[in-house]
Amino acid sequence: MSTALLTDRYELTMLDAALESGRASRACIFEVFARRLPDGRRYGVVAGTGRLLEAIANFRFEDEQLAYLRDNAIVDTATIDWLARYRFTGNIWGYHEGDIYFPGSPILVVEGTFAEAVILETLALSVLNYDTAVASAAARMVSAADGRPLAEMGSRRASEHSAVAAARAAYIAGFGATSNLEAGRRWNIPTMGTAAHSFTLLHDTEEEAFRAQVSSLGPGTTLLVDTYDIPTAVELAVKVAGTALGAVRIDSGDLPTQVSAVRRQLDSLGATHTRITVTNDLDEYTIAALRAAPVDSYGVGTSVVTGSGFPAAGMIYKLVARTNDAGTWVSVAKRSAAKATVGGRKYPVRTLNTSGIASAETIYVNEPSSTSTAERALLVPLVVNGVADERYLGVAGTALARQHHTASIAELPADAFRLGRGEPVIPTVYA
């Protein structure tokens, strides 16, 4: 499906005017970065790169899109003819998907003519802003869970397409499963889910509902025990499924107190291996508050798909260099108050100490560093002459991003994982 109209009108009107002025063919470099992290956050997690590369490959103006532009007089006939032939033929570099980023980190670098690069702005930002926000929140929840598994279950709290993207972003950041079947099909993410309260309410008794579920799914299933009275439900659950009951789920109440009481009750009934999973509008703070409770796993919905209060990562797409009439590269930057940018092509590295822990995000401007053994170069080629590197696409790309995230988050200092408000855990330095 064409992604060409997943864009703002001004991208095409800029193109229209640049073609008329004769400047559209100037070579340009655009960068995607965030001026700051969401308030109080110490690091962010890059996500959405693989989805974006696939969206760029489908950025084609076909008859339907061209007819819309023509019928609504959005651009002139010459521009419509240009768009009919559009294919991105430039180069794109970026941080590995799943990597950590900080203020100023050029997580995506797009090089091409002004015409072919500028019209990717809205698409790039819509994908990266949302997916990165979700992954950044999910990573905080993973660290708060302290090794206990988390499942993403926020589909009903996002649009149908965002739900699929959110499941992927959370998986990259360390969640182990999703409730969303399309995300499971498309990205090979493990899926989970058993029953809601409506299933219990459908039946004449709670015991009847439990027997129906165990008959269908086996004793290893997860039974929801808070529809009526939790102690009564736990006793019924073990009666129906036996001590081989897989898990019980608690979705309401004072969770620390409830979980401890349920654990004691399960153990007293001989169900010592039955796990306890909790849901109930969790976020990183409530997950951290449950560290001392005998919780075995968590299900997170609204908070993860909305970025835990920050549904967009604040990424921007800025022109930082272009050629002049002589073909020489010129650095360009905004100078307006509070929104000034740093011009020039960037070459970011992460400085690591002898223990492999990050101490700075150093961004070299216009000239790459010598990349000493203490520095890890952060940009990798994603698209070369218009062709995306297939390693970063699809199921394999998603798995690679998850793997890279595990390695990159291990580079962070311990202070990165404090949930209290704070500054970025390492500084961004321009050199």
Image (spheres, rainbow, N blue to C red):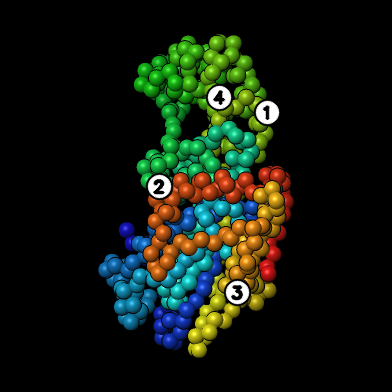
- Which residue in the protein does label 4 denote? 276
Q: Can residue 227 be spotted in the picture?
A: no
Mark 4 and mark 3: span between their CA atoms? 54 Å
Mark 1 and mark 4: span between their CA atoms? 14 Å
Mark 3 or mark 4, which is nearer the start of the sequence? 4
Q: Nearer the viewer, residue 141 or 384?
A: 384
Badge 1: residue crowd in 10 Å (few <14, some 14–19, many ≥20):
few
Mark 4 or mark 2, which is nearer the start of the sequence? 4
Q: Nearer the viewer, residue 63 or 353?
A: 353
Q: Find residue 128 and report its horizontal and vertical position in percent.
A: 51, 58
For badge 1, the amino acid type reads Ala
Badge 2: residue crowd in 10 Å (few <14, some 14–19, many ≥20):
some
Badge 3: residue crowd in 10 Å (few <14, some 14–19, many ≥20):
some
Identify the residue at image location x=37%, y=46%.
186
Q: Nearer the viewer, mark 3 or mark 2?
A: 3
Mark 2, secondary structure of its residue: helix
- Which residue in the protein does label 2 denote? 395
Q: Quadrant of the N terminus?
A: bottom left
- Which residue in the protein does label 1 denote? 292
Q: Find residue 209 and report its horizontal and vertical position in percent.
A: 41, 19
Mark 2 or mark 1, which is nearer the start of the sequence? 1
Q: Quadrant of the C terminus?
A: bottom right
